[in-house]
Image (cartoon, helix red, strand yellow):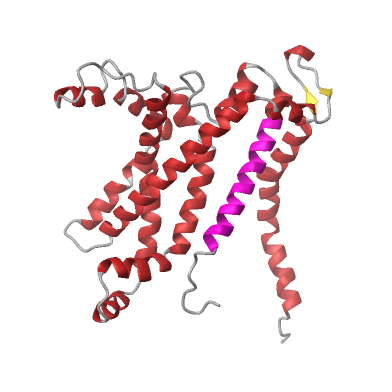
Amino acid sequence: MMTPTPRRDQKTGLILIAPALIILGLVFIYPIVRAFWLSLYTENLGTQLEAVFSGFANYQRLWGDGRFWQSLGNTTIFTTVSIILEVALGMAIALILNQAFFGRGFVRTLTLIPWSLPTAVMGLAWAWIFNDQYGVVNDLLTRLGLIETSITWLGDPTRAMIAMIIADVWKTTPFIAIILLAGLQSISADLYEAHAMDGATPWQSFWQITLPLITPQLIIALLFRFAQAFGIFDLVQVMTGGGPAGATETVSIYIYATVRRYLDFGYGAALVVVTFLLLILAVAVAALLLSKFRTPVSGEK
């Protein structure tokens, strides 16, 4: 009987993952390569939708495109604030759901409902909630005597962004909570008991035991949410459409308008390529920074 060698095991592994790599290349790598190739051409109504090679002219145009930089700033604000709130609330919810209480399984199931709803449907519901004429928010504030006239939530740049962030936090906080809960479930209760016997407070146990041991799950949740929030489209499209006056227009909304509304395919492809590269760079930097805070667990070096 032949003994398996590392080289043979390596070849076997490559053969087994080859189908997955091929599928990944078709659905992921090819579109990006195709978008880069298209970005080297000018194809819009000015050229009668004929592809005319223009080199890096689309990228030069992008550099001076104020609307792109505004949409990138909107995306950055939305992503940063949403993730900070979602992590804070997700951690609190996960800690609560990790406790033993009557009906815990039912409460955990209810927690997943916002995450399971289609984003477009949820966005439409929140658009109604923040409606200035018959929205629930204005009605509650009026009944409580906090306001006398209706607030135009989605018609003001700052308030529209706040409304979108609230809707996104409500939708995606359960995702982070469930991931962190999985990490909390893997921590042995003996660690907390031993720590308490040494005189540690619950707050000290959280910082010295809980947080270090769930760092891997926290990193995964942050990276997933960062990629999703940075590419947000459906929520913005349904709630504000990027308005008012482009105050909530994200990069994805701008790319959509460039390609579908203005039929500027070459420039739209350049926007896709640059956004993709920025996202990859941001995720890589975030992963590097977060990994520095990761505490090795038993068996790791």
125 and 278: which is toward the camera: 278
Image quarter of residue 270: top right
Is residue 116 visible to us here?
A: no
- Report which quarter residue 256 is drawn in: top right
Q: Position of residue 43 (x, y in %)?
A: 76, 20
The residue lying at 42 percent from left, 34 percent from top is 119
Residue drawn where x is 49% and y is 58% of the image: 219
Residue 39 appears in the rendering: yes
Chief secondary structure of the magenta portion? helix
Against 104, is 274 above or below?
A: above
Q: Residue at x 70, y 48 (%)?
A: 25
Residue 267: x and y in percent read: 71, 25
Q: Give the number of callouts.
A: 0
Query: Could you tell me residue 257's position as x and y percent?
Result: 59, 21
Between residues 190 and 29, which one lies in front from this camera angle?
190
Q: Which residues are magenta?
A: 270-291
Q: Nearer the viewer, residue 273 or 8?
A: 273
Is 281 magenta? The answer is yes
Observer-nearest residue: 202 or 188? 202
Q: Is 240 positioned to the left or the right of 288 in the image?
A: left
Quadrant where the N terminus lies? bottom right
User: Can you give x and y, in whole percent of width and height, for residue 77 in the image?
Assistant: 48, 37
